[in-house]
Amino acid sequence: MAVSSSQVRRIGASAEAFVADVTQHLRRPSQRGNALRYVRGMLVGEGRKSLDPVAQRAGWSSGEYHSVQHFVADAPWDWTGVLRRCAERVVPQIGLRALVLDDTSFPKSGGASPGVKRQYCGQLGKRANCQVGVSLHAAGERHTMPLGWALYLPADWIDDPERCRRAKVPAGTRFRTKHELALELVDTICEWRIDTAPVLGDQAYGDSTELRLALAEREMTYCMNVTRSLGLYAPDTDFATPARASRRGPGPSKLRADRAPCSAEQIGQSATDTRELVYRTTSRDEELTGVFSFHRVRAAKTLRDRGEAPAEEWLIVQHPHASHDRFEYWLCNLPQDTDPCELAELARMRWTIELDYKQLKGHLGLNHFEGRSWAGWHKHCTLVTVAHAWLTEQRLDPKAQRPD
């Protein structure tokens, strides 16, 4: 929850020290000062957190207003470095258990904001004019926090250089799918001084064979939601090149399976070895109960797309039970001897980052940015993340004055 003006005054030194630490690599004192002004603006008061109402609540002078506006919209500074310092400072405190890929939408009017298009808007639950941002979050035992942001630019934006120029999209930016943006975010944090953890994602990410294989090639584990129709082979399926049918022409070169694949739904709904497990996703949660089955499988699409024998992995199925009224499916490449409770906890942990979005959008103004530049959007998301990280650290410190 956002804090009041009186609370910020009481703990102002703490907020100032936090922002000074995570922006220490910014060379100019004016940039560090503007970062503090902006972060405090996101923390203080209720209502809209776009620049004009923030300036009015904070009582900025005209010079301060224009300086902050330039800092966010146009001034060159390394926002990835700010995110890195936040992560390296706060993630060790939350007891990292997973990295969560997701995306979120920002409803917009008009067509000038970078990436805006009529597309599916999760916030509204329908197609609407909006931006979409891909995000990566740390999910821990004690809290969750965002690690990075990437604005999705639809192909028709990339195909319109003049429109990109007006939105100050960097020259040479190519079209990247949400899966590609997600992988870039993962690659970025792998260079930071934080632990690695299994990567989680919903069906939009889990159904991407290329994303799962790319994570595996980086020796990263994952536990991804997948659709019920995903084709899977039994673990003992044999993959071989068929024998040459005749002496004429080239022989077969592609691997083939010795049987047809089954769907995740077929495997899950025919399961007889189900287990009722008690698990928790964070230390703050009460214990949860669910019915699961666990199956060793091989993904059929790996064979179709790459011609490679698929690696053996887990299909995790949650069965209808009590308040859980439908089947759900996850594909996971953790080792075969992984404890079933750990698999169940990872499968369900993705939902914990909804706490991030609730605070980021509900109280810290993530979706209130009105600027029309590509860099400005990323800077705004970064500074909102700084505010969120400071609140998280305050709640983790038993000696700190609680900002709740």
Image (spheres, grey):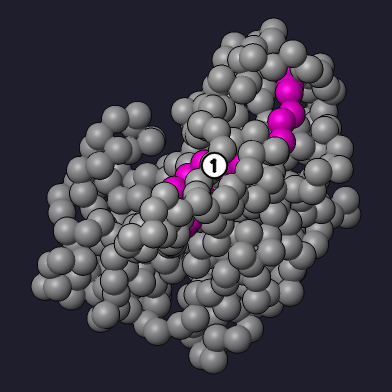
Query: In this picture, is 163 found above or below 332?
Result: below
Tell which of 303 and 222 is nearer to you: 303
Q: How far from the left and from the top, in percent, is residue 84?
A: 63, 72
Q: How far from the left and from the top, in percent, is residue 352?
A: 65, 38
Residue highlighted by disc 1: 257
Q: Is residue 139 visible?
A: no
Quadrant assignment for the C terminus = top right
Give, as a single range, the part of the protein colored magenta: 291-307
Please report the residue visible at 74 percent of the width from the left and 29 percent of the height from the top.
294
Tell which of 346 and 298 is nearer to you: 298
Residue 71 falls inside the magenta stretch: no
Q: How far from the left and from the top, in percent, is residue 131?
A: 30, 51
Amino acid marked by disc 1:
Ala
Please report the residue visible at 55 percent of the width from the left and 61 percent of the height from the top.
214
Residue 301 falls inside the magenta stretch: yes
Please report the residue visible at 68 percent of the width from the left and 45 percent of the height from the top.
312
Tell which of 384 and 200 is nearer to you: 200
Query: In this picture, is 294 found above or below 143?
Result: above
Q: How far from the left and from the top, in percent, is residue 195?
A: 77, 65
What secondary structure is found at the residue carrying circle 1?
Answer: strand
Query: In this picture, is 352 found above or below 395?
Result: above
Tell which of 60 and 295 is nearer to you: 295
